[in-house]
Each structure stands twice: as C-alpha cells, then as structure tokens.
Image (cartoon, helix red, strand yellow):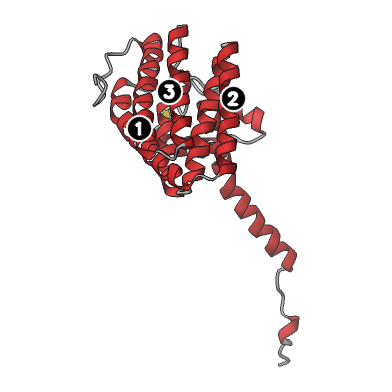
Amino acid sequence: MTRPKIGSMHRAPLTSVSTLGKRVVERQALPDELAGRLREMIVRGELRPGSRINTPRLCSRFGVSRTPLREALKMLATEGLVELLPNRSALVRQVTDEMINELVPIVGTLEALAGRIACARIDEAALAEVEALHERLLQHLDQRDEASYMEIEDAILRAVFNIAGNKSLMKFYETLTVKLQWQAACHQTLAEWQQTAEVQKQLLHALQNRDGDLWAMVAYRHVLHRAALLLRGVERLTGGTTLRVPGWDK
C-alpha cells in the first residue's frame, strides 16, 4: 500500500481559512457596531425616550438583517437603554425620577474626581483646547442654540476626562450618563442659560488656576442643576414626581 506524501494530503486553501476567520469576526463585530450606532441615536435624541424602535426601518437604514439588530438591542437592554417587549419589538427606555435620584450623585462624584485629576495634569496645550471650546460655548449661548450649546458643554467634559487620562473612570462615566439621557434636559429662560454660562466660566477658571477643589464643588452642583432640567423634561413627557437628590437643597 502506497502512503500519500505528507505534503500531498488535502488541506483547505489558506485563503479559505483566512476568509472564514474574517467572516467570523464580522459576524461578531456587527451587533457591537449596531449597538454603538443605536446608542448614539439615543444619546442624540434621534430615538426618543419611550418611543418604539422601528426595526424594519433600521434594518433598511443599516443594510442588515433582523438577527444582528436583535442582538444589538439585547446588548442595549442589558445596559438599561431599551426595553424588549414580548412581541419581539423594543422601546427606548424612559428615564425615571428614581433613576435620576440613583445615578446623579454618582455622576457628580465622577465629574468632580475627573476635574481634580485634570487640574493636576493639564498643560498649556490642553488648556488652550478647553478655552477654545468655551468660546464656542458662549457663541451658542448668544445665538440661543441649545442643541449646539449642550454638545459643546459635553465636549468640554470629554476633554477634561481625556486630560485626566483614566480610561476606567471615563468608561464608568459614559455608562451612567448614557442611561440618564441628558438630551431630554432643556433650558427655558434666559436666566437659566446665564446661570449655566456662569458655571462654565467658574469651571474654566478652576482649570486655569489648577484648582481641583473649586472644580469639584462647582461641577457637582452643576450636575444637580442639569438633573433638575432633566427631570423637568421627563415630567413634560410623562408627568414624573419630584426630584430628591442628596445635596439638592444646599
């Protein structure tokens, strides 16, 4: 009996193995990517709290089948961003006053800590970036462009977290703030806008003077203020109850 030579035995072409591996990676990555896109849509307010998620429309928009979209929605359900219904549909979860009460003190503490670290680490280049963002913030205030104003306000916070350089701290913060859905918060009077602008001026002053204590105090109270605006937005949509956050009445 003639044995086949070692090199002559049948093997799958290397290109097939590589292609197969790529397909596996793509199948695993697609739900993660979709979850990220949906998360952004929720944060921007494109998918509004309490609204039903139109899966056929999203499948058409992203060019995917229902299966990876359902997997993405399951991921968001574990994060508390969507609610899966028995008929295989889903709703964007509505933020509640209980959720605000629970998460806001933690978010305030994380912002305070990030600012303390940033004040100790900030260099002139990073400070100049924040100062430029602050100038854009004031422009949006003059124009009463609330969406752009809040976008820049968030950009300033992201810059501070980046300066702090603690990835775990930023991850915890992002996980909690996406649940709060800050986009539902809104200013209604000029006095509220001016108050917010004054807070941003104090935060910038803290960074310029490397004053971590000042940043921590102002940032925490600003989170409480934003929480009040958020609750008002929630009440407008659902008729919620009164906010009770530790430190709110001080």
Q: Relative to 5, is 156 above or below? A: above
Q: Which residue is mark 1?
A: 108
Q: Which residue is mark 3?
A: 199
Q: Could you classify mark 3 by the number of other residues whose Cα lies within 10 Å: few (under 14), some (14-19), or many (20 or more)?
A: some
Query: Of helix, strand and loop, which one carries label 3?
Result: helix
Kind of residue sitting beneath label 1:
Gly
Please state the horizontal and vertical placement of residue 130, each as a whole percent of the image: 55, 34
Please state the horizontal and vertical placement of residue 181, each as a whole percent of the image: 44, 25
Residue at image x 37%, y 28%? 218
Please state the horizontal and vertical placement of residue 235, each as a whole percent of the image: 36, 11
Q: Relative to 102, is 3 above or below? A: below
Quadrant containing the C terminus is top left
Q: Relative to 121, is 41 above or below? A: above
Kind of residue sitting beneath label 2:
Glu
Kind of residue sitting beneath label 3:
Val
Q: CA distance from mark 2 to mark 3?
A: 14 Å
Q: CA distance from mark 1 to mark 2?
A: 24 Å
Q: Could you classify mark 2 by the number of other residues whose Cα lies within 10 Å: few (under 14), some (14-19), or many (20 or more)?
A: few
Asked if the residues shown at circle 3 and circle 1 are in contact, with their CB atoms under 8 angstroms apart, the answer is no
Given residues 71 and 173, the one toward you in this image is 173
> Toward which corner of the image does residue 216 lie, by quadrant?
top left
* Residue 143 appears anywhere in the view: yes
Query: Of helix, strand and loop, which one carries label 2?
Result: helix
Please state the horizontal and vertical placement of residue 244, each as a whole percent of the image: 25, 20
Given residues 180 and 123, the one toward you in this image is 123
Residue at image x 39%, y 34%? 215
Q: Which residue is mark 2?
A: 135
Query: Of helix, strand and loop, which one carries label 1?
Result: helix
Asked if the residues shown at circle 1 and circle 2 are in contact, with their CB atoms under 8 angstroms apart, the answer is no
* Residue 91 appears anywhere in the view: no
Q: Nearer the viewer, mark 1 or mark 2?
A: 2
Given residues 94 and 117, the one toward you in this image is 117
